[in-house]
Structure formats: C-alpha cells, structure tokens
Image: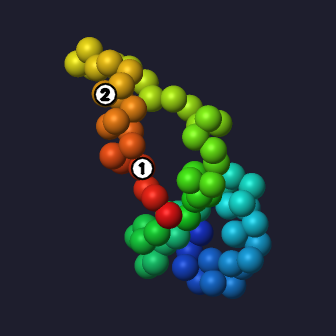
C-alpha cells in the first residue's frame, strides 16, 4: 500500500493509476488525513480466480458462507 498526497495524486494521476492497474493500492491524503483508497477492481477478476470463503467461527456451512459472501460483494 502506497500513500500519496492529493496534490501528488493530481499531478501524477496517470502514472499512479498505472501502478494501481499493476496491483498497487493507494491511500490519498488531504491535509495529512486519509480521504480515499484507490485499489484495483476485484470484480473484473472471474470468481473462480478469487480466493474462496474461509469457513470459521460459528460452524458455518459452505452454502451459508457463499451466501454471506454474495451479500457483501460490490456489483458494478
């Protein structure tokens, strides 16, 4: 994860977005406080390439874990 100021992000947006395309995550600061996180879009990756849900905690079954993961997915 890389941290950049808002001014730096404005001046170098093209190069920084190239880094994001390559997998880097950026945190943009304004006046020293984080205001945004820029990360690669996970939804473009097919679901079969993403890591599967972890089964832990309250004896959750695979079906329940998948349903909960789907509830939290961001859809484009």
Residue sitting at x 59%, y 58%:
41
Q: Is residue 41 left or right of residue 70?
A: right
Pointer 1: what residue? 73
Residue sitting at x 46%, y 69%:
36
Pointer 2: what residue? 64
Q: Is residue 8 above or below residue 43?
A: below
In this view, the residue in front, 35 or 60, is 60
Q: Is residue 63 left or right of residue 19?
A: left
Residue 2: x percent and y percent?
61, 58
Q: Is residue 17 left or right of residue 1?
A: right
Q: Which of marks 1 and 2 precedes in the sequence?
A: 2
Q: Which disc number belongs to residue 25?
A: none
Residue sitting at x 74%, y 55%:
22
Secondary element at tag 1: loop
Q: Is residue 35 above or below residue 52?
A: below
Residue 3 in view of the camera:
no
Residue 13 in view of the camera:
yes
Q: Residue furthest left?
A: 58
In this view, the residue in front, 27 or 65, is 65
Which color mode does the image show? rainbow
Q: Residue furthest top?
A: 59
Residue 34: x percent and y percent?
43, 67
Mark 2 and mark 1: Cα distance apart in space: 15 Å
Q: Is residue 58 above or below residue 18?
A: above
| Residue 58 sits in quarter | top left
| Residue 4 sits in quarter | bottom right
Residue 12: x percent and y percent?
72, 79
Mark 1: few, some, or many residues within 10 Å (few <14, many ≥20)? few
Residue sitting at x 36%, y 25%:
63
Residue 54: x percent and y percent?
43, 24
């Amino acid at each position: 994860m890389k941290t950049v100021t808002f001014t730096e992000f404005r001046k170098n947006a093209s190069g920084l977005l190239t880094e994001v395309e390559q997998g880097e995550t950026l945190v943009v600061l304004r006046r020293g406080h984080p205001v945004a996180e820029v990360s690669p879009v996970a939804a473009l990756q097919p679901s079969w390439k993403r890591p599967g849900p972890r089964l832990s905690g309250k004896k959750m079954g695979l079906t329940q874990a998948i349903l909960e993961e789907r509830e939290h997915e961001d859809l484009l």
